[in-house]
Image (spheres, grey):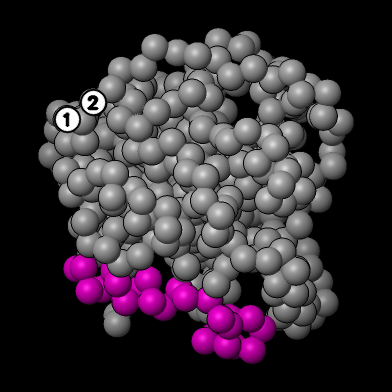
Amino acid sequence: MRIDRYWKQAAAGLLAIMTLTMTGGNLDSLAMTNSQPLKAQGQMLSSPDKIIIRDEGDNAQSFQAAAASQPVIQTKAQIAAFGEVTTPKTDTTSLFGAGRLTMLANHDTAAQLLSVIIETGEGGLIVVDGGWTNNADYLLNQIKQKGGHVQAWLLTHPDSDHVGALADILYKHNGEITIDGIYYSFAEDSWYAEKDPEVAKMVAYIKGAFGLVPQNILHGDIVSGQVIQAGPAKIQVLNQAYKMNNDFINNSSVAYMVSLNGTNTVFLGDLAKSGGEQLMADHDLSALKCDIVQVAHHGQNGVGYEVYKALRPSVALWPTPQWLWDNDNGGGSGSGIWLTQETKNWMVRLGVNANYCIKDGDQVIE
């Protein structure tokens, strides 16, 4: 959930002070440098707003002209009811069969992000968001190492810590990987401009990048219930972007369900409470038969408990850095105002038996 950017800047300042204290004044020591993904072991748990650290790449390109003429490509969508999108369980010994899910940590700064790569097991990839512009190189290398063929790139919402990396890959590395389709739901530009000029700036930046790719790979007209095929995986779009006045950018998140080898993973992006309530009002979320959920808004101040209760996951993905996991604003664990512990308590209450968190590095689930 997002409130006021002045609040976020103040919180970012606290994080910077904490960082300097912990590293003896050396910010470089904060970056994660281990390039090998951690094969994660799911953890059991016992029982305000997103911090934004400014992405230095926001001004890296001139993009306004390209964005102004950016079309939305119309497609003929396949629609299915919730609960109808499934995949066969071909391997009972693993969650994803020959595939795997990798949730990437931030190897460049201490900031939060959402960046997930799903390998389908047949040479194709599904990417969810991707992170900040300064995460682009690491993400690009990971995609290349996994074959370089993205069958579906799913965007939840046009915030810097979610779409910046894709934008910079398209601007600076266009053609180095194959992308079959980019899927998104954005409101009109004027709506973002009215709400927050900084968000409007990122929307223009990503749309400018869209102008550099073949226009038939852009799917900016996705609708609720739409089914996307990605090799043996099936993806269902759970909602179009909501236009809400409160916490507007986070509540505009598109949620997706990805089914692979009979395992259903729900990505909530940064949906906040109102967006979660609307999603529940629109659909029976229990019909999705969710196995894995990405906790909304980096694990705090996202959707309410009832959304998770309806989904009933057994595994939780936490795109949550250490300081946010600990609710640490520089004064030690519990010193911050973030609501991470509340979400942890919900996962315990629901009987979630494995928690994978990027505080421990890249998380690989097979």
**Residue for point 22% across, 74% down:** 349
Is 347 contained in the magenta span? Answer: yes
Label 2–label 1 contact, CB within 8 A: yes
- In the displayed structure, would residue 2 be above or below residue 18? above
Q: CA distance from mark 2 to mark 1?
A: 6 Å
Relative to 209, residue 328 above or below? below
Q: Residue at x 58, y 19 (%)?
A: 72
Q: Secondary structure at mark 1?
A: loop
Residue range (magenta)? 328-351
Residue 80 bears which disc, if any? 2
Magenta segment includes 132: no
Rendered position, 279 above or below 166: below
Q: Residues within 10 Å of mark 2 (few under 14, many from 20)?
A: some
Q: Amino acid at mark 1?
A: Glu
Residue 315, x across and y down, in percent? 27, 57
Name the amino acid, label 2: Ala
Is 47 placed above or below 105 here? below
Q: Which residue is labeled 1 in the image?
A: 84
Q: Quadrant of the C terminus?
A: top left
Q: Residues within 10 Å of mark 1 (few under 14, many from 20)?
A: few
Residue 338 drawn at (x, y percent): 53, 76
Q: Is residue 233 left or right of residue 5?
A: left
Residue at image point 62% right, 66% down = 3
Determine the secondary structure under disc 2.
loop
In the visual, does 243 lie left or right of 226?
A: right
